[in-house]
Image (cartoon, rainbow, N blue to C red):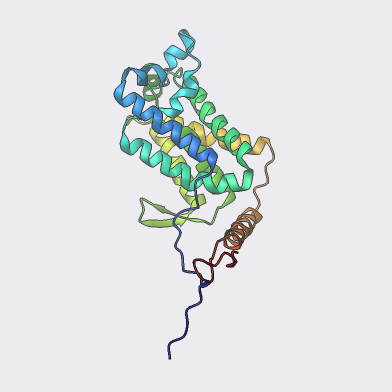
Amino acid sequence: MPRPTSPYRQTSSFSFGPGPLSTALKALIGVNVVMFLATTFLPSLQIQLGLVPQWVLHDLRVYQVVTYMFIHAGLFHILFNMLALWMFGTELERIWGTRFFLKFYFITGIGAGCLTVLLSLLPIGPLSQLYRSDIIGASGAIYGLLLAYGMYFPERQIYMYFVFPIPSRVFVLIMGAIAFYSSFSDSGGMANATHLGGLLVGYLYLKSLGVSLSPFAEVKYRYVKWKLNRLRKKFDVYPGGRDDDWTRRVH
């Protein structure tokens, strides 16, 4: 005799990534997408809103150290930046809270832009080329988030090039070394100098605030995630009884 199926049985679920997008992440990604579409149809906006150190210093277009963060050169450029923002930003926002997360994002992004302007004044080949270059992308802020992620979750596995699993602290060191070398090499440091700036500003900012970077941050994150999952299950709706039974149970 077949066993009756309970109407309250929960089905298995599968989740990918660090979790759903928060309102803050949706807003950041939304603005980046809108600006990407705007610059696609109006290419002149890219040179106006990108970071050109010469214009910042001589034409006082100081706003460019902010607007450059929302301009991207192509589909893969914005796709990988927004993917990294979701992958690393989601977990950091859960630990920090939305206000501190947004503050950190903009401080590292703007700080990376300001450092890029200063580096462009150095009489070093690749760096001096930055002076008249148009620098765009959210990578400065993204690298700041990556640095924070590596400090909070040093043993978390990251798949480099989507193939090689390595601890996040090692991944940060590798990316920092690449950015440092590329900034001073003949291969050019247009974006790499800004990447390096994001790492440096993020590190100095966290240290200046005396933010706790103990290994218990990982334990705290796991506890918060477990608690959220319990609340989600608690408020799931499971109807019982007949469809026309107005007294059927709701959980």
Residue 147 at x, y percent in the picture: 53, 42
Residue 19 at x, y percent in the picture: 50, 52
Residue at point 44% right, 25% down?
68
Work out whether residue 21 or residue 170 is closer to the camera in this orientation and state it. 21
Report if residue 11 is visible in the image. yes
Residue at point 50% right, 23% down?
66
Work out whether residue 235 or residue 92 is closer to the camera in this orientation and state it. 235
Q: Quadrant of residue 218?
A: bottom right
Residue 199 at x, y percent in the picture: 52, 37
Residue at point 46% right, 23% down?
67
Report if residue 189 is visible in the image. no
Residue lying furthest top = 59
Placement of the C terminus among the 4 image quadrants:
bottom right
Work out whether residue 109 or residue 102 is closer to the camera in this orientation and state it. 102
Q: Up-down: is 2 above or below 175?
A: below
Work out whether residue 128 or residue 192 is closer to the camera in this orientation and state it. 192
Placement of the N terminus among the 4 image quadrants:
bottom left
Q: Up-down: is 9 above or below 28?
A: below
Residue 250 at x, y percent in the picture: 59, 64
